[in-house]
């Protein structure tokens, strides 16, 4: 067994244990796992391609809304609509973002993706799209997925499966080429390849998980509304989680999601929500300033102390 | 119809001026540093609350304290948070997102989440221009904004520091090579940006109300104008802000107010994709 | 409904919507987080992640044994909205417990649990309450959140879910379509047609007083106002109004003056507003711009006294549906409640807003239902709740009973009346009159405000007084033209 | 038929005419020199041939095919490559990975890596990061990277810049070696006439974006235009 498969199997076991341990608060575990899915898929593209993608929720929203529309308007059975939604959502998001990432990079890409989700949110809410999206009310009730231990373990499996796939991709030839593309597209061009072909693959893989997660998420939420799909606030929440966890690490996103959800869980009974936010953001800011690589870097140090000789968890 | 056209022209120019002074700091520091400082719109909101809170004590002199105060706040923000990591645009971006959210939470702790309309205008009457009623205070805001923009443009073309700000390529390293103290220049731009933010907050907040959420839409506006005009270009800001101002008012007046945001954002996205340097700016990214 | 000959049209339209299972409309008032549109309160949602906790199982239990009744509270607690659920609950339950509880059982509040207006948080909040074994959940969140909770509410019909804020009739349709599943779902809040008539009624009053008949509507671009626009088009002309224009305003609007200008240019004599999200902006900008047109409507947020203080009484041309009647004319119970609130809390919300009264009514209704049933057993309580009837209720809560048709019956109307209405459509007229009692209040300078207008004890009264102008039963004064109005606006 | 034909290529940058109609034919197996004073348009010519810029006028033909509108990577796949004036590398990635890149991208056998390393003389430093390399090492890495795509024609831009004469001779050895062993056609660009003279069969001189002369060094320096360009 490869090192990656051992690590991701161990991660899956750890997440399953967490779910079993917290089965009384399983919706909190599920919430954390969903955010881990979103943050990891975001981090996969953003960290390794060098494009700061603020439009990641396009995948989540396209997957979520497609599945919701199939289930709500056409009464397709939920599993079918989730599968179709994931695929269609991935394609729609990719067809939009891929040409843009070929065309503009750096700050321009950041801005295009940022402005795109605001425009999309506007569009989804507007009267023009209302027959399809139900505007601000959203598509509800959808066939729901409920908070069960089985579902928590299921999405943890999805997370780890993609985590494993991502790790394999990063250590494949394509991944090695992407390493160059991130730092210098010219190097890849003069080596005889279009760097965007490889970053485009990264985007597609990143989108596939996000879109699948989005399709599952709207059914778990019971409704497709902008606030759990396209909204900027949702995007930023994902970014914040990835930053706190450590964005150059797939595991970092998981740590970040569990940390942030956990912190809220612990703080909520103690302080009012403004203070709760303040503490979380303050903590996030401090963590980011002191350890720009996020919580995972602290964890790495700890692991290295306990397991001598072991290299970075990434 | 004629009246509507007059309305669009005048209101477009007024909003253009307010948007312009809101955006100057953002666009220039981003152009200089090659990063996005998301915290600036949050300071815009903080400035508006400073005005609201101080005006009962300081009356008409409020702005004399708030404008430099916000300028200093922005300089301090730069020195504390941005300078240590200014070479890494991603770090700046992430740090300022967290900072902006933290500032909003902090403000929400102390202020109601509703809107406040306690900024007293200097002028209270209306003016009638070709049958279009305009508040004097709003006209004043527009005028002050344009004077500030043109003044800044003049300074930037006729002083060493100004030329440095405009002339510096985005690469900070490049400017160090030609012997300029980038930290000092950026700090000055932050200061000037802060003063203009305060000015913008005074007129914008006085007209549309002040709330702890009032940084989100300005952030979109700053992004859009920076995009359309081109990063770090005063001429670009002036062109883009007029375009956005007119377009916004024209869409609302002549087409459908519901697609206002969509039209403006689409314009910005199209310009980013097909002319990434903006209408008058340096190439970004 | 209000007029026999046009009812069939409206009915068929409605039935198409409702029977299609599509939400008719929605009101999401006071989503102060900014705007459901564009760059909406970036922050509000972000921390949203910080989810609470959840429940282990998908099927909740009521934990129906023991001597306590557990009432769970959820909503956006950093916001006046959540406070409008929590505060009435705390105030009332303290009193109820002191008086010996409900049928001898003490009430225990579980929560409040913050949902941050956010779906994932709402789900964990809901499931946490289930885990705590609550009997009743009082929820003060918007339609968005309720959309997300519906599937879980349907999973747990044994836990009563009293919605204080979300008012979409489309949600209630679930009850009618699958009663066994959704029987525990009650909407203790105004329903959309009521919101329309609580604007039309005072408009008729103003028409008679000033002779105005040119009506202009400004509505926000949300689902709930779509249905209201349809009512407007159908009903207003028959009441002698000329519709001179309708503006649909995006939620991320910053500047409302263009719409006032449109109305002026159209020669409007009165502007009917259907606004929830940006009510504060609307009122202030109208005042600031000295719009010489009477303006009134549903602006839920403006009911809070804190707002009046913040805005220096920027009220002028506005009159708004509120839960406040003139104090002297109100029931002593409600007056005491208002007074207690105002003297207890000094931060926002200074006074109960609309959903504050909904919570007050909801808890009362629950208390009375349990007392009538003599048990807290869910089905018996549901049966009694369905018979809830408050003829004096300013706000119409709504719910469907088994096998009901298009119209839900409301707590402002006895259930047998609803049954008769179904059999005889022409009865609808009287029926809906009684459910649209949201009073209209107006701010007036204290020099001209009548003596019995709404002044709370301890109010500094610097900003003037609230005067109820409609309905006649509660009216404490008459609509006053703002000082900058022309003598006879556009008349 | 020439390997590379540059037909009357013009390129204008804002305010500057970088190339004013350059025509250049290079035959198979040739080692061609390209010289010219600073700002003459040498680098622009190379980047235009590589496809970094599109020519504003004229066309570029490679092995009988018009490549003027091709992407860089397609030109590389056709067998064209170049080294860069300033070494292009990623400091965090090893020299081995730099050489592997072109091989992976094109699906060549992994054995190429060591062959190339030996050819340029980097075999002892394969696991180092490129920023430890000397100026000469950086040139070698540039050549190795270019070789990794199995080109049939390579252009060496400023290939002696920053090197001592002895180091320059070492590079010349490498150029001779690859020209012979791999039957490569080479375009050597520099302004160090002494070194270019030692390796080029024929040399082209450009100045202000136009070719002013072409021939052996002897021929060139009897040409008054060339002398003027260099002295004036």
Image (cartoon, coloured by chain):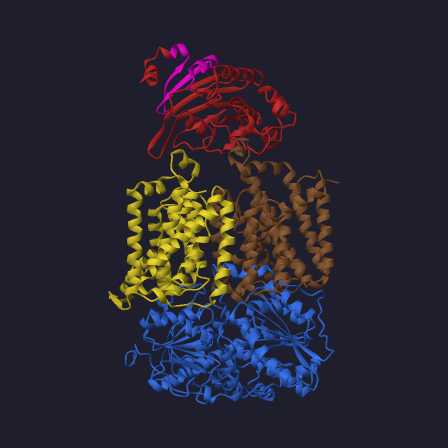
**Chain C representation colour:** blue
Q: Can residue C405 be seen in this view?
A: no
Q: Does the magenta stretch include residue B58?
A: no
Residue D181: percent from left, percent from top: 58, 16
**Chain B representation colour:** yellow
**Chain A representation colour:** brown
Say above or below: A230 vs C105. above
Residue at 55%, 37% (x, y): give it: A181
Left or right: residue A279 compared with residue C217: right
Q: In which quarter of the image is the C terminus of chain A?
A: top right
- The span shown in magenta is D191-220
Residue A65: percent from left, percent from top: 57, 59
Residue C152 vs residue B208, the one in the foreground: B208
Residue at 43%, 33% (x, y): give it: D54
Left or right: residue C89 compared with residue D56: right
Residue at 37%, 21% (x, y): give it: D37
Residue C1 vs residue A187, the one in the foreground: A187
Which chain is depicted red? Answer: D
Q: Does the magenta stretch include residue D192?
A: yes
Left or right: residue B190 compared with residue A173: left
């Amino acid at each position: 067994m490869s090192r990656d498969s051992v690590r991701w199997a161990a991660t899956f076991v750890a997440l399953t244990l967490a779910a079993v341990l917290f089965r009384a608060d399983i919706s909190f575990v599920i919430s954390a796992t969903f955010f881990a899915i979103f943050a990891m898929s975001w981090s996969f593209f953003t960290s390794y391609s060098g494009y700061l993608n603020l439009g990641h929720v396009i995948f989540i929203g396209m997957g979520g809304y497609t599945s919701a529309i199939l289930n709500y308007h056409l009464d397709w059975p939920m599993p079918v609509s989730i599968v179709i939604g994931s695929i269609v959502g991935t394609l729609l998001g990719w067809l939009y973002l891929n040409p843009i990432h070929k065309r503009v990079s750096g700050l321009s890409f950041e801005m295009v993706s940022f402005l795109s989700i605001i425009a999309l949110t506007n569009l989804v809410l507007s009267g023009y799209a209302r027959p399809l999206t139900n505007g601000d009310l959203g598509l509800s009730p959808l066939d729901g997925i409920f908070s069960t231990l089985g579902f928590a373990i299921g999405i943890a499996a999805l997370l780890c499966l993609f985590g494993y796939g991502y790790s394999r991709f990063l250590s494949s030839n394509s991944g090695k080429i992407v390493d160059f593309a991130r730092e210098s597209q010219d190097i890849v061009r003069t080596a005889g390849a279009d760097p965007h072909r490889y970053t485009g693959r990264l985007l597609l893989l990143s989108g596939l998980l996000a879109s699948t997660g989005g399709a599952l998420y709207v059914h778990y939420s019971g409704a497709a509304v902008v606030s759990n799909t396209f909204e900027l606030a949702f995007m930023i929440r994902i970014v914040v989680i990835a930053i706190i966890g450590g964005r150059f690490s797939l595991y970092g996103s998981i740590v970040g999601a569990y940390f942030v959800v956990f912190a809220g869980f612990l703080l909520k009974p103690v302080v009012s929500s403004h203070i709760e936010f303040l503490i979380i953001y303050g903590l996030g800011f401090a963590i980011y300033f002191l350890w720009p690589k996020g919580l995972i870097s602290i964890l790495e140090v700890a692991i290295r102390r306990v397991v001598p000789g072991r290299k970075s968890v990434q | 119809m004629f009246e509507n056209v007059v309305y669009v022209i005048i209101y477009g120019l007024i909003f253009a001026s307010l948007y312009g002074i809101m955006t100057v700091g953002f666009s220039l520091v981003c152009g200089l540093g090659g990063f996005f400082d998301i915290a600036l719109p949050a300071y815009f909101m903080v400035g508006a609350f400073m005005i609201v809170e101080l005006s009962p004590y300081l009356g008409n002199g409020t702005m004399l304290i708030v404008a430099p105060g916000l300028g200093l706040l922005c300089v301090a923000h730069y020195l504390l948070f941005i300078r240590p990591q200014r070479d890494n645009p991603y770090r700046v971006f992430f740090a300022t997102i967290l900072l902006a959210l933290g500032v909003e939470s902090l403000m929400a702790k102390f202020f109601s989440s509703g809107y406040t309309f306690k900024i007293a205008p200097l002028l209270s009457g209306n003016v009638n221009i070709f049958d279009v009623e305009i508040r004097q205070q709003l006209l004043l805001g527009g005028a002050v904004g344009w004077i500030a923009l043109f003044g800044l443009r003049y300074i930037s073309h006729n002083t060493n520091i100004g030329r440095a700000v405009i002339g510096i390529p985005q690469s900070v390293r490049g400017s160090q090579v030609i012997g300029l103290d980038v930290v000092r220049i950026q700090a000055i731009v932050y200061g000037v940006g802060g003063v203009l933010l305060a000015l913008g907050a005074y007129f914008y907040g006085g007209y549309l109300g002040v709330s702890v959420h009032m940084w989100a839409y300005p952030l979109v506006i700053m992004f859009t104008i920076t995009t359309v005009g081109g990063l770090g270009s005063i001429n670009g800001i002036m062109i883009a802000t007029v375009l956005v101002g007119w377009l916004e008012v024209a869409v609302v007046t002549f087409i459908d107010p519901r697609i206002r945001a969509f039209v403006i954002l689409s314009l910005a996205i199209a310009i980013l994709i097909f002319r990434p340097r903006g209408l008058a700016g340096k190439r970004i990214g | 409904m209000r007029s026999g000959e046009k009812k069939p049209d409206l009915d068929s339209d409605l039935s198409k919507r409702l029977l299609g299972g599509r939400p008719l409309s929605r009101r999401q008032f006071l989503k102060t987080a900014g705007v459901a549109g564009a760059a909406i309160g970036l922050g509000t949602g972000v921390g949203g992640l910080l989810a609470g906790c959840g429940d282990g199982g998908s099927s909740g239990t009521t934990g129906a044994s023991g001597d306590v009744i557990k009432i769970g509270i959820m909503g956006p607690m950093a916001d006046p909205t959540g406070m409008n659920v929590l505060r009435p609950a705390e105030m009332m339950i303290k009193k109820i417990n002191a008086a010996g509880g409900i049928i001898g059982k003490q009430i225990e509040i579980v929560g409040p649990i913050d949902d941050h207006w956010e779906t994932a948080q709402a789900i964990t909040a809901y499931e946490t309450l289930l885990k705590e074994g609550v009997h009743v959940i009082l929820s003060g969140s918007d339609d968005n959140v309720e959309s997300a909770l519906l599937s879980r509410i349907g999973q747990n019909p044994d836990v009563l879910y009293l919605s204080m804020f979300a008012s979409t009739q489309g949600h209630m349709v679930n009850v009618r379509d699958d009663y066994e599943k959704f029987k525990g779902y009650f909407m203790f809040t105004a329903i959309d047609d009521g919101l329309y008539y609580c604007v039309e009624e005072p408009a008729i009053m103003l028409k008679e007083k000033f002779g105005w008949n040119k009506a202009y509507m400004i509505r926000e671009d949300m689902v709930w106002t779509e249905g209201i626009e349809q009512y407007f088009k159908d009903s207003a002309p028959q009441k002698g109004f000329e519709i001179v224009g309708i503006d649909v305003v995006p939620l991320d609007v910053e500047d409302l003056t263009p719409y006032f200008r449109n109305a002026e240019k159209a020669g409007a004599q009165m502007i009917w507003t259907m606004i929830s999200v940006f009510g504060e902006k609307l009122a202030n900008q109208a005042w600031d711009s000295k719009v010489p047109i009477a303006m009134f409507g549903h602006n839920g947020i403006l009911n809070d006294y804190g707002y009046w203080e913040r805005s220096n009484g920027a009220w002028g041309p506005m009159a708004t549906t509120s839960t406040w009647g003139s104090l002297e004319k109100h029931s002593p119970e409600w007056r005491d409640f208002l007074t207690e609130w105002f003297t207890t809390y000094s931060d926002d919300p200074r006074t109960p807003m609309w959903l504050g009264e909904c919570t007050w009514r909801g808890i009362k209704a629950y208390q009375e239902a349990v007392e009538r049933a003599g048990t807290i057993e869910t089905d018996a309580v549901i049966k009694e709740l369905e018979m809830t009837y408050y003829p004096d209720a300013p706000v119409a809560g709504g719910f469907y009973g088994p096998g009901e048709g298009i119209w839900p019956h409301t707590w402002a109307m006895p259930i047998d009346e609803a049954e008769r209405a179904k059999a005889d459509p022409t009865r609808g007229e009287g029926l809906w009159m009684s459910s649209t009692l949201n009073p209209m209040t107006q701010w007036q300078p204290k020099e001209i405000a009548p003596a019995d207008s709404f002044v709370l004890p301890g109010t500094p009264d610097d900003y003037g007084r609230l005067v109820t102008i409609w309905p006649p039963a509660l009216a404490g004064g008459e609509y006053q033209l703002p000082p900058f109005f022309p003598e006879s606006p556009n008349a | 038929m020439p390997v590379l034909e540059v037909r009357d290529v013009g390129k204008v940058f804002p305010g500057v005419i970088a190339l004013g109609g350059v025509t250049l034919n290079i035959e198979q197996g040739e080692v061609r020199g390209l010289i010219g004073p600073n700002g003459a348009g040498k680098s622009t010519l190379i980047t235009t041939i590589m496809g970094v810029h599109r020519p504003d006028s004229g066309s570029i033909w490679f092995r009988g095919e018009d490549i003027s509108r091709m992407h860089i990577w397609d030109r590389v796949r056709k067998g064209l490559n170049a080294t860069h004036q300033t070494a292009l590398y990623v400091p965090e990635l090893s020299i081995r990975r730099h050489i592997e890149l072109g091989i992976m991208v094109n699906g060549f056998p992994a054995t190429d890596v060591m062959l190339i390393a030996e050819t340029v003389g980097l075999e002892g430093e394969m696991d180092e990061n490129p920023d430890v390399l000397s100026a000469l090492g950086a040139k070698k890495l540039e050549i190795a990277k270019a070789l990794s795509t199995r080109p049939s024609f390579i252009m060496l831009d400023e290939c002696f810049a920053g090197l001592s004469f002895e180091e320059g001779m070492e590079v010349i050895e490498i150029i001779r070696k690859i020209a012979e062993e791999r039957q490569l056609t080479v375009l050597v660009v520099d302004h160090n006439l002494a070194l270019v003279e030692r390796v080029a069969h024929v040399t082209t001189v450009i100045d202000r974006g136009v070719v002013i002369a072409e021939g052996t060094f002897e021929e060139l320096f009897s040409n008054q235009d060339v002398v003027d360009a260099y002295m004036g």
